[in-house]
Amino acid sequence: MKLATSAYPISWHTSWKSYADKVEAWVSEAAHGGAEVCVFPEYAAMEIASIGGEHIAADRAAALEFVASRLGELAQLHSDLAKKYQIYILSGSGPALLDGAYVNRCGFFAPNGDVAWQDKQIMTRFERDEWLVSSGGPLRVIETPLGRFGILICYDSEFPLLGRALCDVDVLLVPSCTEAQSGYWRVRIGAQARALEAQCVVAMSSLMSGDPRFYGVDEATGAGGVFCPPDKGYPATGVLALGELHQAGWVYADIDLSQIAEVRKDGHVLNKLHWSEQDPRSNSADKVTLG
């Protein structure tokens, strides 16, 4: 498959048409670039808040409520675009109401109209302490004709047991939103670690922003990247494709499922297979005192 992952700049919109036209332009570009899958970043849906005006976009509660209220329209838009361009789309995530609390949710839209929703599992300090966004539904393995996909939203990629729950997928999608380069590197290092452990391909997307009118997404930086195990047949760096920091656009990579299978079967190392050989007591360690 050919995959496109984004460094996507948040924009100000005065109408739903403006937002829809922008998303379609991005999907169209990816599709015409040959991509069969395209990946938008975490919290990209928050640009919808601008449609409500500055007083909505700048207010924590109002912005969450406004964007969550448009989730149905967002789903319809991405479903229509997936069908029109015959491409799988991971939508930019945004707030959804679940049992009276907001969760961070994205959708994986198929060309036949199907959709699988994925919620973030572990909240950052900002999400839990200031934004008041909560953990959502469970992780999912998404079966498609192109292969098996999993989604770890931003901070989730930094936790190996979440990655292990998705270790049988072929491609992990990691949509991210990070304020500073240090955040970008934390998620990128997590994404590359998950590629190493599960011997799979990991596609990371990044939100870009510098608009103080938005609450919570007023600053964001990063780059699109596609990572792999640094093993047999793959680049020694573990990097299949990488965009430039702060540079908006799509990054493309060709992904061969047979190559993933070969590395898992007969790589120079077999991280996925050997995971179970870890001592079950490894969550603790014996103490040794030296003089």
Image (cartoon, rainbow, N blue to C red):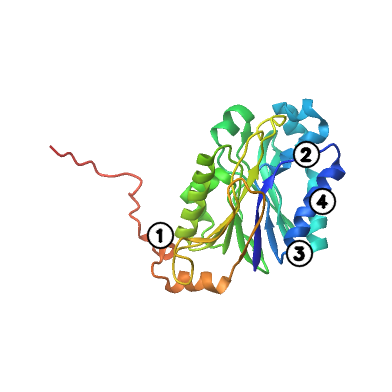
Residue 229 pos. (x, y %): 47, 63
Q: Could you tell me residue 166's position as x and y percent?
A: 54, 57
Q: Mark 4–mark 1 contact, CB under 8 Å?
A: no
Label 2 secondary element: helix
Residue 254, can we see it?
A: yes
| Circle 4: residue type | Leu
Residue bearing the label numbered 2: 48
Three-letter amino acid code at disc 2? Ile
Spatial distance from mark 4 to mark 2, Cα to Cα? Answer: 13 Å
Say the numbered circle drawn on residue 77.
4
Confirm or deny contact between disc 4 and disc 2 (CB under 8 A). Answer: no
SS assignment at label 4: helix
Which of marks 1 and 4 precedes in the sequence?
A: 4
Q: What amino acid type should be assigned to the residue bearing mark 1?
A: Trp
Q: Is residue 112 above or below residue 192?
A: below
Identify which residue is drawn at 65% across, 47% down: 41
Q: Amino acid at mark 3?
A: His
Residue receiving disc 3: 32
Residue receiving disc 1: 275
Which residue corresponds to the image point at 35% horizontal and 56% vertical from the top-left? 278
Q: Quadrant of residue 216?
A: top right
What percent of the width, then of the height, locates residue 187? 52, 46
Q: First in sequence: mark 1 or mark 3?
A: 3
Compared across the picture, whether 188 is left or right of 88 comes to left
Q: Nearer the viewer, residue 60 or 121?
A: 60
